Image: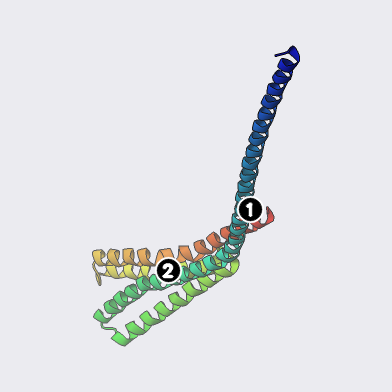
Amino acid sequence: MSNTEEHYQDADRVARAVEEENRRRRDTREMEMGRLRRLHAEEAADDRALSRYARTMRAIRRHQMGQTPERVRRSLVRLTAMFVVISVVGPMLTAVFVADLTAQQGVPRWVGLTLAAVYVLSFSGALAWHARACWSNGGRSRASTAVAWALLLLPVPVLLVAAVAGWATWVGVLVILVVLFILATPGIGMSCELPLQYEQIRSAKKLDDESK
């Protein structure tokens, strides 16, 4: 074999090797490009899904923030009414106790019961006014608070006089006073505390809306 043929064969082998290497690299590049396209497509799909989720969550949050204060207000108003009703029980028991003491001293029972009813209705009206004033003002109401406390404390000197006069035992007077304050005091305090909590929630929502 001549040198020319040998060079030709060597060149042919080199050419085939180069073509094979180029084909291998081309296939590798095509496979890598396909993998990258699939990866980019998956990432784009994930991004779209996350964007939809974020938009949905923002919409839900805006809806909740728009609805929550009003729902909270209704719940707190109902809770205030419950405290008012419970608070009336203490003065009612106290009034009945005093009416029974007056009946034991010879006063007609209807007189004692009438005075007891007037007291209970007065305290109920004062406490309802107190709660309404607190909600209207969004917080403390001095006038209604003073009236509610004055009516709450009204039986105290009457019971102390009854105990000193011997019409009732000190134990009985102390028990009825403890029951009176345990049941009635939370109603006066919470009637103004709950509106303050609502104002704080509403202020927090307002700041949140302004920060968007």
Give the residue drawn at x 57%, y 62%. 64
Q: Which circle marks residue 83 in the picture?
A: 2
Rendering coords of residue 153 (x, y %)? 41, 67
Point out the residue furthest to the top here: 3
Q: What residue is disc 1 on? A: 48
Rendering coords of residue 31 (x, y %)? 63, 38
Q: Is residue 194 left or right of residue 12?
A: left
Q: Nearer the viewer, mark 2 or mark 1?
A: 1
- Please name the amino acid that badge 1 sits on: Arg
What quarter of the picture does the N terminus occupy?
A: top right
What quarter of the picture does the C terminus occupy?
A: bottom right
Q: Give the vertical position of 35 relative to 211 (above or below).
A: above
**Disc 1 element:** helix
Nearest to the observer: residue 10 or residue 177: 10
Nearest to the observer: residue 132 or residue 111: 132
Query: Badge 1, how many Cα within 10 Å: few under 14, some, many 20+?
Result: few
